[in-house]
Amino acid sequence: MSTGKRRYVGAPAPRREDARLIAGRGRFVGGTRVADAAHAVVVRSTVAHGRIVGYDLDDARALDAVLDIITVEHARTVELPCSGLGPDRPTHYRALDDTVRYVGQPVAVVVAETAAAANDAGALVGVNIEPLRPVVGVEAAMDTDAPLLYPDWGTNVGIDFPLGDADAATADAEHVVDLTFRLARVAPRPIEPRGVVADYDGQTLTVRTASQAPHAVRDQLAAALGLAVSAVRVVGCDVGGGFGAKEHAYPDDVLVCLAALRLRRPVRWDEAPGDHLAATLHARDAAHHGRLTLDRDGRFVALYCDIIGDLGAHPSNVGAGPLAVSAMMATGPYRFDAVGARVRAVVTTTAPTGSYRGYGQPEITWTRERLIDEAARRLGIDPVDLRLRNMLDPHDLPYRTAMGPEYDTGDYATGLRTLRDQVTSQVTSQSDSRVDGRRRGTGYACHVEMTGMGPSMAMKAEGLGTGGFEKAVVRMEPDASVIVHTGLAGMGQGLETTLAQLAADELGVPLDQVRVVLGDTASTPYSPIGSIASRSLPVGGGALIHAATALRDKLLTIAAHRLEVATADLEITDGVVRVHGVPGAEVSLADLAAAAWRGWDLPEGTTPGLEEQATYDPPAYLYSSAAHAAAVAVDPDTGDVEIEGYWVVNDAGVLVNPAIVEGQIRGAVVQGIGMALYEQVVYTPEGQPAAGYDLPTAREAPDITIVHQRTPSLTPGGTKGVGESGTISSPAAIGNAVAAALPEIADRITATPLTPHALHRALTQRN
């Protein structure tokens, strides 16, 4: 940036979103009111596996307020995209299907004048399902006598491929640590449930929804409903948490839109609280067989992981993507002579799995970091020292790992040493212990995070079927106020604030003169994948910086003409363009802007107006990094775990707003605590979701000490993604801390969540 001293980037500017949200003026889909809106209820299967052989709709239709009932017959051509697993695997699935493959699958939609009438009618819809045998769990799905969800496949294995060096699986060395890990199925659980308000006026279908990716949802809805893309408008509302679960269209969404098309009136649908665990995409749910080999000096020789993941009833829009990312990011910040993986994805009669904060990276970090700690325990080496002797150095970067990713910038060892110093200075040694009968331990974990998802051609090569660029439009109005348009979505990550900070610094205007417009497909530039994968600021901010730079250059050109100096002699500060070192030689931005929009006194060849746009398609992914540590106390009589301290050293490059970054990290760490200790979606062998889902609360959230590294990335502005970082290493750090507290069962600390029941059972049955 060349506008002078940075006033806003790197400063803890207050979040501009908060004022309206705290005052109850948020624009959430649940609060959207559209005149004459009907209400929809999605009727869901209570059977895990079966064939629909008929409906009994008479009682439901007899209610006066019922307007429409949509069944399979009405929606046979309505399909949504799923990630193709191979040439003989489907690339789409039906919004309503004759075959039921999970409890919670939509089987009909009822529309009525009121929400109460829709609920009453929905309860009266009879769906006759001929039951088939369910299959729950990856092991059961791969049994030779397992029922097949897709008989044409001849198997329940959707994909099976190697990655990296296959010899890593059999690499011999002085020491071998071989363990099997289980990552429980979890649910994103945002505060705001999903919802849709769809309105069709005969020409345009307008859809208001809580979405991380409004343009992607628009494209999916248009294709599903056979409409021109130009005939669909998606208005992204405020999003009360997304975490990956709101980055695509669901069957519910497209069916509500279909109802609006059929009725030619607005239709709204709000996800019922009980529906979230049954129908919104789950995540994780994988088994890893990990093998780490080391030489006699504790040097890592090889790492191999056999990854088996549960796709649920059908591949989601991301398919086996999280499993592939687990394999790709297996190395973390370490050197290995050989690294390999086998990735298998199976289908089961459970809810589909898909994107969730971390996207395969918390899972592989759990496996790798638990293997390292177990190796340190067996070899009698301090776990931090073992990591440091195998860690990549800054002079190794850029570094292409054996699994493909090319790390750009970072200093992993300094981060881990800084973390150890923080922990050492704050943790009371166990020898002076509080005498309360609990066992204490401290655990560490490190990761490198794939962020800034975006190289469009790389995404094509990976079969993702979309682009990864971002576009920004920046306009300075005649009064020198600034409007930024981007197709990204705000979902609590403070995007309105950070983009405004970038624009204000680049253009030299006060922060309160910048307005950011997000996620309305009718007025914002195209964003192929939206606010996912820790990419909003690195990629969207990159586009904004390019556009704002072009606008600044135009302003300087006009000012240089007015002041009769070279542009190199000018600077923009505090809303004024000044000549360096010449008091009084200046012109206000408002004066320049007004003249530019009137076409007055412009240099030859300069067009009237002040609006610039730019597209940024990053040349590569970015890689942030972090080291985490947790201190825990474990009650050996009950298995209860309390986190007594937590520390993070995080490198997200240049920090536009440190307070927002810290908020992102703290929230993500608490989600990681949930994965480590509490959260699990459980199905019975019959495929029925079990009741109850535990989440961490403020009581379980420890004080979290955060130290920032700032290794700039190669992207404009030097930022790296940070939205997922806190989630990636936190489960492993907690698992390692529990293993340190309970060394007699350390090699059995392999499955999440580490509930009191699981730990108590391991302690009492260890022999």
Image: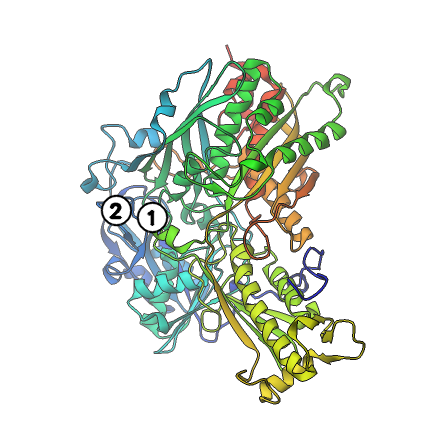
* Left-right relation of 160 to 733: left
Asked if marks 2 and 1 touch (Cβ < 8 Å), the reply is yes
Residue under the point 41% across and 46% down: 354
Does residue 671 appear in the picture of this structure? Answer: no
Does residue 631 appear in the picture of this structure? Answer: yes
User: Eyeballing the image, is 3 above or below 286?
Assistant: below
Task: Say which of 243 and 729 sits in front.
Answer: 729
The amino acid sitting under disc 1 is Ser
Residue under the point 54% across and 28% down: 754
Residue under the point 32% across and 38% down: 348
Dot 2, how many residues are within 10 Å of its Cα: few (below 14), some (14-19), or many (20+)?
Answer: some
The amino acid sitting under disc 2 is Ile
Q: Position of residue 246 (x, y in %)?
A: 46, 54
Q: Which residue is mark 2?
A: 129
Callout 1: SS? loop
Q: Position of residue 352 (x, y in %)?
A: 37, 45
Q: How many marks?
A: 2
Residue under the point 52% across and 64% down: 237
* Scheme of image coloration: rainbow
Task: Say which of 435 and 526 sits in front.
Answer: 526
Q: Position of residue 186 (x, y in %)?
A: 47, 40
Q: Position of residue 733 (x, y in %)?
A: 59, 31
Considering every residue shown, the one lying at the far right of the view is 583
Dot 1, how many residues are within 10 Å of its Cα: few (below 14), some (14-19), or many (20+)?
Answer: many
Callout 2: SS? strand
The quarter in which the N terminus is drawn is bottom right
Task: Say which of 395 and 730 sits in front.
Answer: 395
Looking at the image, tell me whether mark 2 or mark 1 is earlier in sequence order.
1
Q: Which residue is mark 1?
A: 45
Q: Quadrant of residue 75?
A: bottom left
